[in-house]
């Protein structure tokens, strides 16, 4: 990987394999890919009710606003780095530029592990959601793993082809699920909610009632995926403008939609009893509100589009993992074969095939072991991924400051120093809360310990590989993470 210091005019190091990729993604396409990755309807059905239930208060809209503000501040340094580091590796590229190759390689392996386990978790959720919909509407009992593998085959085909095909599929799915969420929200507000509209969910005095740490933790979890904008740098029409704009737009859309939906949901349940009502049956809150305020047709749309929402999320993260592997292969960390570009589709098709095979193998092993798809596979792995990605953000914030301390000082101090320090402070607090409550997130202290051990091993594998090469093979070390 090549990085510039200050504003020196760099030679674009993406010349090579990455130059062969399709470069047709505009701001809208990248935003679709990223917002689809956070599955708005999936969050409305699963995450937002948990924010109410686990926090024990009605301040969910403020938690989402707070998360959006922190991530917007983080994005200041994150997008600034995209101007200096002309590489689609995102987290690991920026960490290497600021902190060196050993931390950069560790970040790369941690990022890849985090996204892989998140993808597997999402396939489990997709299988369960599809199985439930098939049983309800067709009267057929189909195993969750069979549904998951059927979608995996479709996603494998889409991931093999031009990225624009995936972007169009994700765009359609995102529009439909976004519309149904907004329809339910507006129906609740127009009808006055359970006992009249109340501004109580927006009262800052409620923020610290109950267990605010859990509420904020799940609010951040709902944003996981926004950072993938930089991964599509090599396929963007104008990377230096497309990636920053897409990042800020994605955060704004996600934060606004979740804050608005949680406000409507609180009023739909009754502002004074939202936490208790969500805690009683968190998995059916959105469906129940849709039935009560918008009718059975909209409720059916919620149930069906929940499947497409999680499908879109899986497709988006499949593409993210495939591109991480592609970039790492061209950075001499993974086998060179994964860095090949398909001559017709202009996509990292070989890397996509490996992602499909790897996902199928791990998912099949977990299913064969008899693990519960939601209580164990989804909960454990999504919890691990959330913590891993938060750690990546922490490392990136430190790397931004370190990188610009060695620069020519021409970048604005807000972008290069103040915002990264603020984001590091805020994210460190969130990581502390996640660690403090990790046993609740992943289903017990034993599982929490294994999650921490697994993430530490993931980082150590990459960092150890680079450190070993530095001591035994200077030539190989010089090539690591260099395009």
Image (cartoon, rainbow, N blue to C red):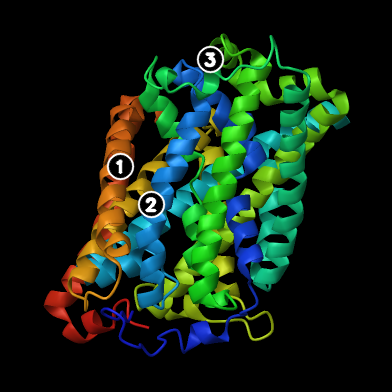
Relative to 99, does residue 437 appear above or below in the rendering? Answer: above
Q: Position of residue 68 (x, y in %)?
A: 47, 43
Q: Position of residue 464 (x, y in %)?
A: 21, 63
Residue 157 shows in this picture:
no
- Give the labeled residue for mark 1: 426
Q: Quadrant of the C terminus?
A: bottom left
On screen, residue 382 above or below 235: above
Q: Residue at x 48, y 21 (%)?
A: 203
Marks 1, 2: nearer the viewer: 2
Find the distance from the CA under tag 1 to the CA under tag 2: 10 Å
Q: Tell me, for residue 275, which label it has, or none.
A: 3
Q: Of helix, strand and loop, which one carries label 2?
A: helix
Q: Earlier in the sequence, mark 1 or mark 2?
A: 2
Q: What residue is shown at x 56% (from left), y 29% (from top)?
A: 48
Please state which of the two labelled residues, at mark 2 or mark 3, is closer to the viewer.
Answer: 2
Residue with the most extreme left position: 471
Specify which label sits upstream in the sequence, 1 or 3: 3
Question: Where is mark 2, residue-wise?
Answer: 73
Q: Pointer 1: residues within 10 angstroms few (<14), some, or many (20+)?
A: some
Taking the image as shown, residue 244 lies to the left or right of residue 21, namely left
Element class at badge 1: helix
Residues tagged 1 and 2 counted as in contact (Cβ below 8 A): yes
Residue 367, labelled with which disc?
A: none
Image coordinates of residue 330 in percent, x first then y, are 41, 79
Q: Residue at x 31, y 26 (%)?
A: 445
When the figure is inspected, residue 43 is found, relative to residue 477, above or below; the finding is above
What residue is shown at x 50% (from left), y 44% (from top)? 223
Q: Quadrant of the N terminus?
A: bottom left
The span from disc 2 to disc 3 (Cα, nearest Å) is: 29 Å
Badge 3: few (under 14), some or many (20 or more) residues near its Cα, within 10 Å? many
Report helix, strand or loop for mark 3. Answer: helix
């Amino acid at each position: 990987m090549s990085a510039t210091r200050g504003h020196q005019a760099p030679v674009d190091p993406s010349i090579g394999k990455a130059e062969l990729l399709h470069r047709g993604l505009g701001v809208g396409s990248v935003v679709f890919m990223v917002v689809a990755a956070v599955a708005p309807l999936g969050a409305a059905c699963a995450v937002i009710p948990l924010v109410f239930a686990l926090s024990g208060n009605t301040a969910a809209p403020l938690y989402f606003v707070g998360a959006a503000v922190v991530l917007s501040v983080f994005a200041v340094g994150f997008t600034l780095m995209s101007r200096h580091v002309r590489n689609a590796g995102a987290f690991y590229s920026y960490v290497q530029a600021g902190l060196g190759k050993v931390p950069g390689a560790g970040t790369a392996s941690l990022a890849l592990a985090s996204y892989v386990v998140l993808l597997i978790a999402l396939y489990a959720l997709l299988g369960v959601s599809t199985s439930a919909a098939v049983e309800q509407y067709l009267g057929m009992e189909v195993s969750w793993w069979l549904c998951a593998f059927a979608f995996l085959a479709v996603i494998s085909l889409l991931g093999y082809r031009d990225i624009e095909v995936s972007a169009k599929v994700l765009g359609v799915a995102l529009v439909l699920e976004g519309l149904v969420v907004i329809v339910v929200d507006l129906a609740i507000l127009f009808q006055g909610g359970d006992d009249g509209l109340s501004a109580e969910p927006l009262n800052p005095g409620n923020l610290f009632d109950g267990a605010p740490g859990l509420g904020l933790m799940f609010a951040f979890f709902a944003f996981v995926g926004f950072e993938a904008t930089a991964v599509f740098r090599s396929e963007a029409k104008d990377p230096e403008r497309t990636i920053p704009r897409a990042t800020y737009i994605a955060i704004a859309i996600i934060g606004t939609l979740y804050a608005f939906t949680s406000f409507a949901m609180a009023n739909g349940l009754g502002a004074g009893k939202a936490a208790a009502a969500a805690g009683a049956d968190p998995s059916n809150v959105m469906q129940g509100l849709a039935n009560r305020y918008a009718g059975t047709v909209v409720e059916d749309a919620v149930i069906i589009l929940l499947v497409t929402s999680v499908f879109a999320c899986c497709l988006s993260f499949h593409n993210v993992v495939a591109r991480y592997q592609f970039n790492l292969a061209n950075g001499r960390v993974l086998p060179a074969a994964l860095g090949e570009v398909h001559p017709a589709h202009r996509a990292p098709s070989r890397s996509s095939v490996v992602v499909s095979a790897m996902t199928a193998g791990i998912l099949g092993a977990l299913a064969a072991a008899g693990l519960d798809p939601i209580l164990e596979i989804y909960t454990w792995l999504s919890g691990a991924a959330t913590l891993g990605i938060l750690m990546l953000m922490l490392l990136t914030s430190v790397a931004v400051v370190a990188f610009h301390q060695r620069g020519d000082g021409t970048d604005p101090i807000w972008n290069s120093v103040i915002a990264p320090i603020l984001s590091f402070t805020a994210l460190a607090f969130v990581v502390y809360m996640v660690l403090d409550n990790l046993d609740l997130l992943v289903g017990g202290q034993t599982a929490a310990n294994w999650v921490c051990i697994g993430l530490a091993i993931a980082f150590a594998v990459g960092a150890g590989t680079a450190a070993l090469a530095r001591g035994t093979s200077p030539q190989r070390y010089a090539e690591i993470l260099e395009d």
